[in-house]
Image (cartoon, rainbow, N blue to C red):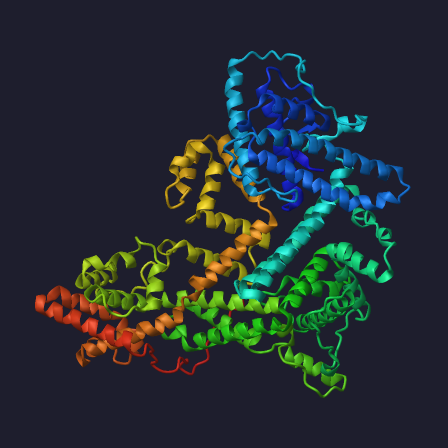
Amino acid sequence: MEKSGKPNGMGTWRRYKLGQTQFTSWLTQTAAKLTTFAIGPRAGAASDKFVHLIQLEVFAQRVADNATPEDVPDSAINILRDVVSLRKKSFRFFSSVTKASMDEKLQQSNANHAQIINVLERVLARLESLVKLRKTREHSDEPKDGSRVTTSDLTNLFAYLEAHQKAGKRKGRKKSTKVKKPQRPADKAVAKASGGSPWIDKFRFGLPGEDEDEADELDLYMMVYCFFEDFNTIRNHVAERWCDYWYDRSVPLVTLAVVINAAFEFFHQLEHDLIRELRPHALYHYGIDHIDYNSYDHYDKKEADERIWKDKAEWLALPSYFELEHTLQIIPPGKTPILPPSQRTPTIYGTTTVEGWKTFQSNVTNQIVLESAHLKALKHNRQETLLPFECQLLSDLQVLLKGRSSTRPLFFSLQLWVDIRSILETDHVQPFHDMQATANKLKQALENHNPSKYCKDYDFKRSWLGRLWETKHFMVEDFMYEDKKARLRQVGIQKDPSPFFLLKHEPVWACLLDFRARLVYSELGQEFIGLKPTVDAAACLYHAALAEDPSLPRWAEMDSYVDTCVDDCQLKVGLRPSQGPAAIIRYYAASRGDENGPEKRAAGMDSDKRFIPEIAVRASLHRQFAFDDKPFSMVEYLEQLRVQLSQGKLTEPEVDKARALMGPAENDFVDGHGNVDLALSNRENGLSRTNKTELAKQRNSKLSQLSPIDILHMLDKTVTSQLEGILTLDYFKLWDESLALLTVVTAAFGDSMWDRLNRDDPDTPRAECIQRLPILLGQDLKSSGPAEQTDIIQRVVKGCRDFLQGPRHFLEGPETDDGEEDPLPPLIP
């Protein structure tokens, strides 16, 4: 089932098997190191992959008898504790039905599972008793039984094993190859596993050999349990984050929507991993067969129903399954249901009873299913295969309505979505209002900044037209309204439908559209100011004025823009205040060429190296979320995002994890800013091809050890930092203010400066010509004396002060075309 000793998947099952295997390797290596003989033929060539369960107690006793407390790392204890905890949960999950079952095989399987847990608990107790003696323990309080193994535990133990394997190989070259027959110390008592039946001597703890299939039924049960455990863990984590918004608004709604949509896609990945493992064994029915609903017979019917619903049905997402099955029964295949606005049932929030919750879930489920049916009809009639940043839940519901076949990820996603609707209550309309505000801002900015006025960049103009159409059609206007209205008229209903009903009642998609609009606003804004060096020219004069008079008011937008540039880029090097105001202007003029030379774009705009890493992260988010033909799946993208973030400035915890991954030999290369690239490059340069492959495996293992919660937390943190950082920079506003500053400073030099700027073409718009102002001033400073230079700088300071203290707005006129129809069709992403 798990070929080549590698567990598949990305959830609890994978971490469980990885932890189990690493613990087995550590235990066998430590037992071998602490004794003067080999472990024996049973754990020979495959000892690093699995051992028989009966050997665990033997190895654990040897470690407990011969090791010092420092020989047992905390990560090994944490991993084994997590394995025991998961085994216990799985045992409770599947054991209730065996009490009343007459199936001897089932009862024996349950007894075997209990025996395995007993053995593992004894092994854990022996190691914990040794660790308690450690005087320099970092944490005196032991984790609770329900603690989960962390990425650092797996990584630390991996590094520990790697170091001991290398040391063992070095020692092995000096020793004789003769192996003594294994013996047990005569004066040491080792507890035997209770009930030493033949099966326990065959049970393998760890991964199977490369040429073997693991057919252990208990591990198959564990797989099913971990599948539902991951769903509920993700569900609880996401619901808690939405509660954070509800109580104190501590997290942006947009972040929550991106995270929950990623969770919807994770459910698909988890199901794919489960089916891939279970398909050869045809065990799809085991998860339900091992739930004993008869155990609630001693309760009255009402209490029994509530307990079953809370303890079992909710945990399995069965309410969503039954609700969808019921909804499909009332929707004819291939038909679009019509519900008159007057017949919509009002949604009642805050219910505390099971019946009340069922009514609430039925109501909101019908809302989203009926709207999904309208989306399906729209796509079929208009050939729109995909809507912008469409929520994964909506896509899954449309697939359900087309094929009439449902999947487990859809049940999970709908169950989580119902939770979110319950948490938001009447605030479910707020995401729509936020999205409309962002969309109208984007629409106005695009309409007021026509790129054709400044250059003939046809690719950018095509993208500009496409984004403008998308914003108007899908965000500002209700693209479903006319279709709904026509369907109501066909059945004789004269009342108009409620506008924007879907976006008002589906907060996730509304927030996703909001995030898409923000990304487009920022990305197109940066591309727009890169068409001409207007902003850089304004930055030059602004910083020259600051160098002369530091008491000037600050320009927040420009300061934020300059902060996005790296320290050694051409623009920022020329803006250093220590150079003096005249030097700043002359440097800018020299770097842009003379006024009669070829026109240049903003310096370095075409190079990614000009900007800080956060700009690259925003660009990757824009590629993934602002285009419908996504280059990667969500899981693939998040793995790449993790690598991208690790290449920038790391936080202290991340630096510690990087040190743990690289080992102590490379720690000297990690600088104080958390830049590990030098360490990794130096390490790779000195490695052979085989070792480079091993290093790549270590990096991949670090990513694979991340749980879905870790990945969602990374996405949460990344999106929030973008919303509070780069996405707050208004490039279009910066462009307008830059034109205003250049206009005010030009006016400070009188009409003669306007004549010089317009001498080539008097019909050129002022916004086009005033960007050459710093170049002309640089020439004047170069050819003038000290007194004239002082006068020029003082005029620049006066113009900047007038701008900073007055209205910062520039409008040359309405941004419209010259009346001719644009020959370029819009590029719809």
Quadrant position of the C terminus in the picture: bottom right
Residue 797 on image: x %, y %: 20, 71
Residue farthest right in this picture? 102
Instruction: Please state which of residues 80 and 393 is positioned toward the viewer in this rendering.
Output: 80
Q: Is residue 487 above or below residue 657?
A: below
Horizontal placement of 91 versus 635: left or right? right
Quadrant position of the N terminus in the picture: top right
Q: Is residue 579 above or below residue 381?
A: above
Q: Look at the image and tell me whether residue 162 can be seen.
A: yes
Q: Is residue 214 above or below residue 331?
A: above
Instruction: Please state which of residues 280 and 817 is positioned toward the viewer in this rendering.
Output: 280
- Image point 68% across, 79% down: which residue? 484
- Image point 50% across, 20% down: which residue? 170
Residue 641 on image: x %, y %: 51, 51
Question: How many numbered callouts?
Answer: 0
Residue 657 on image: x %, y %: 49, 41
Residue farthest bottom in this picture? 494
Residue 748 on image: x %, y %: 20, 77
Q: Is residue 515 above or below residue 486?
A: above
Q: Look at the image and tell me whether residue 769 can be seen.
A: no
- Image point 33% across, 58% down: which residue? 604
Instruction: Please state which of residues 664 and 643 is positioned toward the viewer in this rendering.
Output: 664
Determine which quarter of the picture holds residue 765: bottom left
